[in-house]
Amino acid sequence: MNPLKIKKGIFLTTRHLFLFVLAFIWLIPIFWLLANSFSVFPGINIRRFYPQEWTLNNYYMLLFDKTHTIAQFPLWFKNTLIVAIFTCLISSTFVLMTSYSISRMRFKGRKALMNVGVILGLFPGFLSMIAVYFILQTFGLTNSHFGLIIVYSGGSGLGYLIAKGFLDTISETLSESARIEGATESQIFLRIIMPLSRPIIVYTVISSFLVPWMDFIFARIILNSGLSKDWTVAIGLYNMLDRSSVNTLFARFCAGGVLISIPIAILFVIMQKFYVEGITSGAVKG
């Protein structure tokens, strides 16, 4: 046999074996969470990876049990969904408008503004959480889902870079032809550029939706009244692991972790093609 083919075969086999091991390690916590969500034992069982007896009762209790005031999963899910939907709409609009203006328009201070945006994006958002909290408190927006939406949406325009890279790949002649025909800038944006930007729109929508869906830090700080009816899913599931309740609610916590992953999994499966295309196309130019 050709030594080069043998060498290539060994390399490919080793690479795929290495990737398989990494994937297996990465999936272990997910399998463990899924298995414990069906466990009859309500607390943490550190002696067995899989439960000895299986049941669907944890899902039923999580959704319909009214005896535990802390376990209000349907209400938490609704709160999170409302915040995520409004944040998604506002953030996506900000990102796309910012990306279009920086990609297509030329104005004084444009490059400086781009550099400032990139630099600010390098800092983690939670560094500003104390200042953000006191600003919201001044305006009476703490313990409010509206205040949470403002926090998630306010700086979303700084995430323009990938969307701008995609818009840079769309031919400028389309915009110039539209201007010659008398189209306004808003008409060019809405009727010409946006229909051609479906991949990056999908990517922006998914990214914007995931931020409030998975966030814990800002939600914990802003929604600090102690009323469980106001919590998001992240706060609610975290409090189910409190020392006083972990031994009775851990299996339900696992069930909640499985349930909140289902909408995201479905969204990714449906939008995967456009999501990947948006990322790769946005990386062509910056």
Image (cartoon, helix red, strand yellow):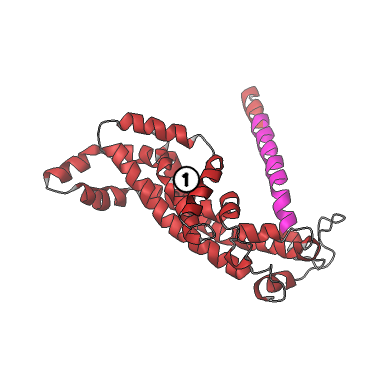
Q: Nearer the viewer, residue 27 or 188?
A: 188
Give above or below for 93 relative to 246: above
Q: Residue at x 55, y 56 (%)?
A: 213
- Horizontal placement of 86 versus 22: left or right? left
- Horizontal placement of 203 versus 25: left or right? left
Q: Residue at x 48, y 49 (%)?
A: 135
Q: Nearer the viewer, residue 225 or 124?
A: 225
Residue 241 belongs to the span the image colors magenta: no
Q: Position of residue 179 (x, y in %)?
A: 15, 44
Q: Residue at x 43, y 46 (%)?
A: 156
**Residue 272 in view:** no
Q: How many marks?
A: 1
Q: Position of residue 248 (x, y in %)?
A: 79, 66
Give above or below for 159 relative to 136: above
Q: Position of residue 97 (x, y in %)?
A: 32, 46
Give the magenta range.
10-33
Q: Nearer the viewer, residue 154 or 87?
A: 154
Q: Position of residue 152 (x, y in %)?
A: 48, 51
**Residue 240 in view:** yes
